[in-house]
Image: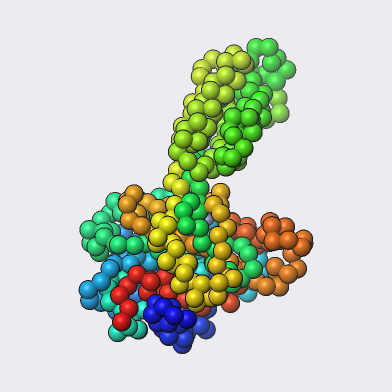
Amino acid sequence: MTSPAARTALDLTDGLPVPDLEDFYRDLHRHPELSLEEHRTAGKLAGRLKEAGFETAEGIGGTGVAGVLRNGDGPTVLLRADLDALPVQEETGLPYASEADGVMHACGHDLHVTWLVGAAEALAAGRETWNGTLLVVGQPAEETGQGAARMVADGLYERFGRPDVLLGQHAAPGPAGLYPHAPGLIMSASTDVDIVVHGRGGHGSRPESTVDPVVTAAYLVTRLQTVVSRELAAREAAVLTVGRIEAGTRHNIIPSEARIELNLRTQSAEVRERMLAAIRRIAQGECLAAGCPREPEITLGNTFPETVNDVGTDTAVAAVHREVFGAAAVFDPGPAMGSEDFPQLALGSIPYSYWFVTTTPAEVWEQAPGASFPEKFSAVPSNHSPRFAPDLSTVAPGVRTLVSGALAFLSVA
Ligand SMILES: [Zn+2]
Ligand SMILES: [Zn+2]
């Protein structure tokens, strides 16, 4: 343990109120709220920040929270957690399972808020050990890709100052106690696409008098599978998933339209543009082949940018995490196909580090089928699963990652 940041972080997190933070987490888990409805969650976070001495504001960009602690000359470090839950019916069977029907913290954002509270309180209590400004952000609507951009558009940085560095972390599957870092691309871009196929409806017994959009949509879904497999080079990582297809009302009615909703994951703007062009070409081609009376409508929905860590920033955070947790606990997992709206907080130029904290309970990991890491990794409940249940043993370490990461940039005495 050599660096002042690591030493100070361990000092400041030595007496963490772990039972209190666990209670805070269980309360958030019981009361999940959907994107831009995170009023209770935001209030809980803001309350703790105020108590810890932060100048705090709520309602930024809808339901966002920011707290600032100005503590002398030095850099401004932003710590971010996201607030929202998902429309998932919880199946964990936990005693503190969701009490909201059909809504669940299935992505671990309740844990993120808990980590943020623990870190904000520890850094505030130990403010004589560092100089600079700590900006703590509770961001709404990560799951819909709106929240970060909304907070920025609502004057987050005009009101609280523009940070010099951004830090964020996410709960992830994997045996609890690992801190994957990638000095560069770590998360992919995501693009939603909606396609409406226009046919001509009629009686199911007389298809010759119709243009059946169900059959055209079926060809389209199949043909879209060739975009990744036949149009991209093997070295280019991308995913195209049709997640929803909808048409018709009854067995014997040929409907007049079919709707397809698909999602792309890409790791470069060039591949994204190429895939969108292929989707347009294939949709138009299938509709032309079927004799549709109109061209298909193709519209873009929610999008998330790539998350690309600044190499110097992430290397510095990974280094302090190695000191705090041991070298074996920090490794480069390579880029994931998941997506984040965290980069929207960077405005294209503020350097940031975004890393993962693995949260699968040890016994769940051990009992998962398979012998290798990849086999177990694909077998344990992951984010967005109704059985996603982070281990409570990760509460304190997730506070330590944030505190040590912040101290790597704040001026430590
Ligand atoms: Zn999520
Ligand atoms: Zn998430």
Note whether 259 is above or below 140 in the view shown.
above
Residue shown at 69%/57% (left/top)?
374
- Camera-nearest residue between 76 and 183: 183
Residue located 56% across and 54% down the image: 334
Q: Furthest-bottom residue in view? A: 15
| Quadrant assignment for the C terminus | bottom left
Colour scheme used in the picture?
A: rainbow
Count of number-bearing discs: 0
- Residue 161's image quarter? bottom left
Compared with 308, 23 (above or below) is below
- In the image, taking residue 80 as reference, residue 32 lies left or right, namely right
Q: Where is residue 339 in the image (x, y as percent from the top left)?
A: 50, 50
| Residue at screen point 46% across, 35% down | 270
| Position of residue 353 in the picture relative to residue 194 (left or right) | left
Instruction: State which quadrant residue 375 falls in.
Output: bottom right
> Is residue 347 at least partly visible in the picture?
yes
Q: Nearer the viewer, residue 77 or 409?
A: 409
Residue found at the far top of this picture: 208
Relative depth, front residue between 272 and 236:
236
* Residue drawn 45% across the image and 43% down it: 303
State the image quarter where residue 362 is shown: bottom right
Residue 142, can we see it? Answer: no
Nearer to us in this view, 384 or 8 = 8
Q: Is residue 82 above or below residue 5?
A: above
From the top left corner, tell me how far across and down residue 316 is, in percent.
Answer: 42, 66
The image shows residue 241 at horizontal and vertical percentages of 60, 40
